[in-house]
Amino acid sequence: MTKKHGFASMAQNTAKLAGTSSAFVAICSITFVWLVTGPIFHWSDTWQLVINTVTNIVSMLMVFVIQNTQNRESAALQLKIDELLRAVRGAQNTFINLEELSEEDLNQLKGKSAALAENARQKAGQAETPARTTSRTRKPIAGSNPDPREARRLVTRVKSG
């Protein structure tokens, strides 16, 4: 396995550097210098254009750098979670690679998992938690059936289909 190469290495290093307090102080200093030079350049259009151009270019580039870093970190975290699912006895291996499912399928699994949790709480004699009727997208969450076999069948059906 190779380590980081090219853009990935540059993106990670840039994202780390951009998130430091030194970078914040540097940007504040640059902005202060730009403001102080306003009277020198008579608040001209060119003076304004300089800061607008620089900030737009830096912002645009940082979007791609940060997104690249976030994508890699998210993928690495997902692999770690998948490995934990494989390693833990009793864990449902059907939950590995769920990130590949559609939002509808994920909402169905979420509803079924919530029903399983509610049944477990009731068996343990804990207080009932309020039922969630909608997802973040305000769509109803399917799955009042708490059968874990149903969740496995759904994952298998979606992955094979």
Image: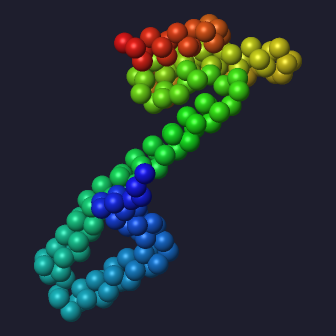
Give the residue drawn at x 49%, y 46%.
Answer: 76
- In the displayed orientation, state which residue is furthest to the bottom: 40
The image quarter in which residue 160 lies: top left
Q: Nearer the viewer, residue 16 or 144?
A: 16
In the rendered image, is residue 142 in sight?
no
Q: Nearer the viewer, residue 46 or 135?
A: 135
- In the displayed orientation, state which residue is furthest to the front: 1
Give the residue drawn at x 62%, y 22%.
Answer: 92
The C terminus appears in which quarter of the rendering? Answer: top left
The image quarter in which residue 10 lies: bottom left
Q: Is residue 19 above or below residue 2?
A: below
x and y percentages locating residue 18 in the rendered image: 41, 68
Give the residue drawn at x 40%, y 47%.
Answer: 71
Instruction: Give the image's coloring scheme.
Output: rainbow
Q: Is residue 30 above or below residue 120?
A: below
In the rendered image, is residue 96 in sight?
yes
Q: Is residue 61 above or below residue 140?
A: below
x and y percentages locating residue 32 in the rendered image: 35, 83
